[in-house]
Amino acid sequence: MNKETLQQSMYDLIVETSTNLPKDVRRAIRSAKERENAGTRAAMSLDTISNNVKMADDNVSPICQDTGLPTFKIKTPVGVNQLEIKEAIYAAMVQATKDGKLRPNSVDSLTGANSGDNLGLGTPVIKFEQWEEDYVDARLILKGGGCENKNIQYSLPCELEGLGRAGRDLDGIRKCVMHSVYQAQGQGCSAGFIGVGIGGDRSSGYDLAKAQLFRSVDDVNPNEDLRKLEEYVMENANELGIGTMGFGGETTLLGCKAGVMNRIPASFFVSVAYNCWAFRRLGVKLNAEGGIAEWLYQEGEKIDLTQGSEAELETAAADAGEAPNVVTLQAPITEEQIRELKVGDVVKINGRMYTGRDAIHKHLSDNDAPVDLDGQIIYHCGPVMLKDDEGSWHVKAAGPTTSIREEPYQGDIMKRFGIRAVIGKGGMGPKTLAALKEHGGVYLNAIGGAAQYYADCIKGVDGVDLMQFGIPEAMWHLNVEGFTAVVTMDSHGNSLHEEVDKSSLEKLAQFKEPVFK
Ligand SMILES: O=C(O)C[C@H](O)C(=O)O
Ligand code: SF4
């Protein structure tokens, strides 16, 4: 294979995967849109997601700012030099990072240092397999961290909330899979896709689960039992009412694929890999020179998800038929302004906000803030940023990150620094809810994965602090216009997340009775 050609193919695979949602995934999202009633929060979120998918495609920019842990699966004929392919992938990763198609995402687990180019111990993941065909098949998945954190592994038999005993049989497996969807709530940017691995050990079980994510969304499982399981889960998981982003709604799951392998007598694992709606996985067949001969997962027409969608965030109703209260906020915000906000209100933000995620929250818990945060807004976000030749920073992608990781710190930090609003996704827990009430704060849920949509609202980067934490973790000072999010936790003790969790658990309990005997 020609070195340059191969490297270009790997680069194209990375860029396409990051920026262009596959056709099978688009089909699944379109069906979800068709099921949601116009005017609901779920329909509104799906419209934002649809716009975002189109913007990413048009701008050739990341669909979601979290370009994940890139995982390559490569099948090679006997005699092909796998080391050459590895080198080409490494070089393509570095280039794609420089070009803002990937976020620098490889972090030293002990020191926290970001390698800056996506290379490092264990990153990217490249798995090779030999096969009898005479061409190379290269596939890539960019699976982000929020959904990865919602993966779950069950060891049968076990007791499950809502569902009771899950035994060592197909019905026990069914219960685990239903539970896996419930426990993810909106935090993995639902509606999601799940890969289920039945059997194996703890590591091969997860590998099998993840391998299912390389199946086409609309294929049919050739194993009769697994086909029934997949169909059952698709039909019933959507009854849980978790909905897009966990806002409640008709579609919670967009795909379910299960695979099976043998186990040893003592172990019986059911492993579930959860993937967000931003299901970025593509593949190519290579020719003898290393050029792209064919793209995979691209059968059928390419759906423009924005076609036929009209609802905008601000016109969407909190409940069908009822227009939401739309409030414009500009920092510094007063306690009175915050106390007026209620769950379901739509907020449009103009002016300044500061990004802060994991490293910043830990830092602020025992250090002073680099800026005055009194009355200010914190955005849980790790953007993709590029510096131009003049040294100015530009936002390439900037959606929210999962807020629950900041639960141990958030309440204390808000009170200590006088922060009035935090924006993120997936909601937060009781400690933050109590702090919002006591201090007069609000939690705003942005649409997870809508990184282009939000990047477009950011009109300028006014500064940056704590760059030592790396690009995704630094505190960026952003100037925004019309940045839209929904109040999901208010200062009166109300939490939409708590409500949806409670009602979905009640619904989960309806699936307690045996189905597969
Ligand atoms: O790291 C991020 O930017 C987001 C992450 O994928 C998440 O879902 O929390
Ligand atoms: S922010 Fe949401 S859409 Fe993006 S990688 Fe994380 S889970 Fe996926």
Image: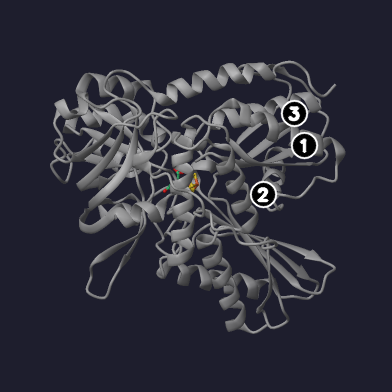
SS at badge 1: loop
Dot 1 alpha-carbon crowd within 10 angstroms: few under 14, some 14 to 19, many 20 or more: many
SS at badge 2: loop
- In-image side of 312 versus 368 (left or right): right
Q: Which mark is residue 173?
A: 3
Q: Which mark is residue 440?
A: none
Q: Which mark is residue 213?
A: 2
Residue 467, image quadrant: bottom left
Q: What residue lies at 49% left-to-right and 51% top-to-bottom?
A: 50
Dot 2 alpha-carbon crowd within 10 angstroms: few under 14, some 14 to 19, many 20 or more: many
Residue 492, image quadrant: top left
Callout 3 touching callout 1 (CB < 8 Å):
no
Mark positioned earlier in the residue sequence (3 or 2): 3
* Residue with the mark numbered 1: 199
Dot 3 alpha-carbon crowd within 10 angstroms: few under 14, some 14 to 19, many 20 or more: many
The residue closer to the viewer here, 390 or 483, is 483
Q: What residue lies at 26% left-to-right and 22% top-to-bottom?
A: 491
Residue 365, image quadrant: top left
Q: Quadrant of the N terminus?
A: bottom right
Identify whether 269 is placed above or below 212. above
- In-image side of 62 versus 314 (left or right): right
Mark positioned earlier in the residue sequence (3 or 1): 3
User: Does residue 233 appear in this view?
Assistant: yes
Nearer to us of marks 3 and 1 is 3
Residue 504: give x, y in percent of width and height: 55, 22
Residue 150: give x, y in percent of width and height: 55, 36
